[in-house]
Image (cartoon, rainbow, N blue to C red):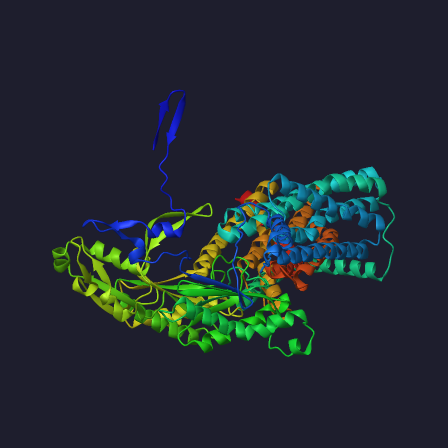
């Protein structure tokens, strides 16, 4: 209250008025106007209690307290989870054990991450082994294989260093990018070493063969590397989750390929000079077959180049076949892969008006069904566990709050976690009429329930009743149009949420000295309580609340609630207000200032998101427009993952076209010609057809693989990869014509094809086998890159086969046409 000095001392004046115990509150005088003291204890009871329970957490059928841990942006999830596990162990062994409590971690995403990383690591090892094995089969030389194989560890280790310098983390996607690059990084080494070996066979010394061989292919290697890197430039600017994934792959592949170029023009020639033998490859059946194949392809190209009709027929036929394959087999698109996380997550929306006790009862109904499953987790091989309709449950939780509830369950067998979905849905949808439930496997990219893969049908307009009518009709049609889909309205389509409306009589209230705010405050104090002051309890301040008894009021008693007027009168609520017991909406949502009802649709995983979008648009939205039921100011917008898919797909389409332009202009600069890059770009259409064909093969032979956004990225990558073979043929043809200008074009093209067939096939097979484990081996994280790998492998294989005939044929036709134009110009 202040300070004062007396003599040599300064005194602090402090007013002590804190309540020391609850009984002190009862002694507070609340009225003494007539001289009679009235204390709180005479008109009220004082007790220590708890705030009203507004949420309930249950874990395996028992009450629990939930603690959520959220990592900071940029923090490494593996390090964070290691720290959490260590802390949990210390708490369980220390203070919690003394209190008879136990802390359980219900979900740990690092299990999935560790499994996914281990799978990619093994795929890198297997892919590298397969690639080196193929090299040995082709080369039959340990020294040659050893020289080329050095490019793999140098490029991979260098990529790790480059990513560290760029501040990027090592994750499943970046490791998958390195796995893709395993086959690609040895391409440059193969071309360089094979050309050095060819020069050795001409009788040159090791030093001269290394110098001439590397110099001859330097331009082609630079062009192929730059085109591979350039196609990633537009990709890094894609936004959202897809952009983050694209950037990780782009950085991993680009760094690996650039390093492989440095190795091919520096390390490979140096090693070839030291250890590469000059003896010819030993003759055997495989070598003889390879020579016959090279001769057949070269002579076929030579014969085709002799006839204009044949050349036009080959070009038209191969391009036409590519377009037919792409048109007939192109599947509908999907957004992001769901992943295979070991977590089933569901949200339960009960009928309007359900209180917390009823929500808990819903949870107990679910627990009764799931209890045998979590009890079987202790003995998963027992007859009881084997007889269950689904896998044993490692953990399960149920949380009820507000007007809804959510739950999660984790299986002891991650591969069978999806089997829990119908088991959980059964008691919810069948046991409580009017209940909506969305139960799904938690997505890797899910922010809220359903956001990982959903279509939000947003209906906006001015009249809530009409919106609810449209929402109810659409909700009913969704299950017919999209079989197996889960759907829920946001908010509820039912206006039956019970509520009590208090309508003040302003005239009568004013006569008694009351305002509408006074009436509302009095009712609020009697029902929910009014904050009066703070109370110090065991070193902490808790709320001191004034409220009515909890167990006496019913809806019919509200009119009798006592209201104390400023004039000292005590009147019932009915004297100053009218009370109506009615129903109303739980909440009213707005989108761009218009009232809105949303129907969220979760399609089954076997139906592509684009297919569902088309069906909803043509079978639900368009009939409403045609019938006039959906007319301005009412409108429907499809959003959610559907909007993300549309936006990202458009970005990829522009990036694909931009990658084509960048590749063309880059090669035009390197070749100093606009003609040769156009010839090289003819290898792209077969690559696109091959990518679609590869995706179809995976769907027919392995597992369902949609055309998701990551899979679409494979088509962009193909542009930079498949042009490499065409660059080798065109570049070698120009080298021959430069060294021997008198050589006929047809012979130069034939000799170029003959000398480049071997490295082209070696590069194609090693690249395909290096990526093959990513496609065929299932496991955690494989759903992220399986589609991308199948597209790249399929496009690489078909484009290589078509390019060997298509590019030389078109090159000869283009050169003849240019020569004819040049002659015609001189004559004129």
- Across and down, in percent, residue 374 comes to 60, 70
- Across and down, in percent, residue 629 comes to 28, 70
> Is residue 88 something one can see in this rendering?
yes
* Quadrant location of the N terminus in the rendered image: top left
Which residue does the image show at 39% across and 70% down from the upper left? 618
Which residue does the image show at 59% across and 53% down from the upper left? 717
- Across and down, in percent, residue 76 comes to 60, 47
Which residue does the image show at 63% across and 65% down from the upper left? 414
State which quadrant residue 587 falls in.
Answer: bottom left
311 left or right of 131?
left
Q: Nearer the viewer, residue 754 or 26?
A: 26
Q: Nearer the viewer, residue 254 or 521?
A: 521
Q: Is residue 250 above or below residue 324?
A: above
State which quadrant residue 413 falls in.
Answer: bottom right
- Across and down, in percent, residue 316 comes to 57, 62
Quick one: which residue is furthest to the front in this view?
Answer: 36
Q: Nearer the viewer, residue 243 or 400?
A: 400
Number of dots carrying numbers: 0
728 left or right of 409?
right
265 left or right of 48?
right
């Amino acid at each position: 209250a202040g300070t004062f000095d007396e003599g040599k001392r300064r005194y602090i004046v402090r007013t002590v008025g804190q309540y020391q115990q609850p009984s002190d509150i009862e002694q507070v005088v609340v009225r003494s106007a007539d001289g009679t003291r009235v204390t709180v204890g005479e008109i009220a009871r004082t007790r220590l209690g708890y705030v009203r329970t507004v949420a309930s957490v249950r874990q395996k059928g028992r009450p629990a307290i939930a603690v959520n841990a959220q990592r900071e942006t940029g923090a490494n999830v593996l390090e964070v989870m290691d720290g959490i596990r260590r802390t949990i162990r210390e708490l369980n062994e220390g203070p919690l054990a003394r209190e008879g409590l136990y802390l359980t971690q219900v979900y740990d995403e690092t299990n999935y991450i560790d499994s996914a990383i281990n799978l990619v690591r093994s795929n890198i090892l297997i892919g590298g082994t397969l690639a080196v094995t193929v090299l040995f089969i082709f080369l039959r030389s340990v020294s040659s294989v050893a020289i080329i194989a050095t490019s793999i560890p140098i490029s991979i280790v260098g990529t790790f260093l480059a990513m560290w310098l760029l501040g990027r983390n090592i994750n499943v996607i970046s490791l998958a990018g390195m796995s893709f690059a395993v086959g690609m990084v040895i391409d440059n080494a193969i071309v360089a070493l094979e050309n050095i070996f060819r020069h050795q066979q001409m009788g040159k010394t090791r030093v001269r063969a290394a110098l001439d061989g590397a110099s001859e292919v330097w331009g082609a290697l630079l062009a192929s590397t730059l085109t591979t890197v350039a196609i990633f430039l537009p990709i890094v600017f894609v936004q959202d989750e897809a952009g983050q994934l694209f950037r990780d792959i782009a950085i991993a592949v680009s760094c690996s390929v650039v390093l492989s170029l440095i190795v091919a023009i520096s390390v490979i020639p140096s090693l070839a000079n030291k250890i590469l033998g000059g003896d010819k490859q030993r003759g055997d059946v495989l070598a003889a077959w390879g020579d016959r194949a090279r001769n057949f392809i070269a002579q076929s190209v030579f014969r085709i180049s002799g006839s204009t009709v044949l050349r036009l027929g080959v070009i038209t036929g191969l391009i036409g076949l590519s377009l037919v394959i792409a048109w007939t087999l192109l599947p509908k698109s999907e957004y992001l892969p769901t992943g295979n996380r070991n977590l089933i997550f569901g949200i339960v929306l009960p009928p309007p008006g359900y209180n917390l006790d009823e929500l808990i009862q819903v949870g107990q109904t679910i627990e009764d069904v799931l209890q045998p499953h979590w009890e079987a987790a202790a003995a998963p091989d027992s007859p009881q566990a084997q007889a269950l309709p689904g896998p044993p449950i490692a953990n399960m939780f149920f949380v009820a709050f507000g007007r809804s509830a959510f739950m999660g369950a984790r299986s002891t067998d991650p591969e069978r976690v999806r089997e829990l979905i119908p088991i959980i849905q059964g008691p919810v949808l069948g046991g409580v009429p009017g209940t909506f439930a969305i139960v799904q496997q938690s997505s890797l990219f899910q922010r809220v329930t359903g956001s990982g893969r959903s279509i939000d049908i947003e209906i906006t307009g001015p009249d809530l009743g009409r919106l609810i009518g449209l929402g109810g009709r659409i909700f009913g049609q969704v299950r017919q149009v999209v079989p197996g889909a889960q759907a829920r309205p946001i908010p509820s389509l039912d206006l039956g949420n019970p509520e009590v409306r208090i309508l003040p009589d302003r005239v009568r209230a004013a006569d008694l000295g009351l305002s509408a705010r006074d009436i509302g405050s009095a009712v609020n104090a009697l029902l929910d309580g009014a904050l009066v002051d703070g109370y110090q309890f065991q070193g902490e301040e808790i709320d001191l609340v004034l409220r009515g008894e909890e167990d006496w009021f019913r809806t019919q008693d509200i009119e009798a609630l006592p209201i104390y007027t400023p004039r000292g009168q005590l009147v019932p609520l009915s004297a100053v207000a009218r009370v109506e017991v009615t129903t109303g909406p739980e909440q009213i949502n707005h989108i761009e200032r218009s009232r809105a009802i949303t129907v969220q649709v979760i399609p089954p995983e076997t139906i592509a998101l684009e297919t569902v979008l088309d069906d909803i648009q043509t079978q639900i939205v368009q009939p409403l427009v045609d019938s006039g039921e959906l007319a301005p100011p009412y409108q429907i917008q499809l959003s959610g993952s559907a909007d993300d898919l549309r936006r990202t797909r458009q970005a990829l389409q522009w990036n694909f076209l931009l990658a084509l332009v960048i590749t063309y202009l880059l090669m035009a600069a390197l070749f100093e010609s606009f003609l040769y890059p156009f010839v090289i770009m003819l290898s792209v259409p077969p690559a696109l057809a091959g990518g679609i064909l590869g995706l179809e093969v995976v769907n027919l032979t392995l597992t369902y693989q949609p055309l998701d956004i990551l899979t679409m990225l494979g088509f962009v990558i193909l542009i930079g990869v498949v042009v490499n073979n065409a660059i080798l043929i065109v570049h070698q043809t120009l080298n021959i014509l430069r060294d021997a200008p008198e050589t006929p074009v047809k012979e130069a093209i034939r000799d170029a094809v003959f000398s480049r067939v071997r490295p082209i096939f070696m590069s194609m097979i090693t690249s395909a086998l290096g990526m093959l484990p990513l496609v065929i081996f299932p496991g955690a994280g494989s759903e992220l890159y399986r589609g991308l790998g199948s597209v790249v492998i399929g496009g690489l294989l078909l484009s290589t086969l078509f390019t060997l005939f298509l590019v030389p044929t078109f090159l000869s036709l283009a050169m003849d046409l240019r020569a004819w134009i040049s002659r015609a110009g001189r004559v004129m």
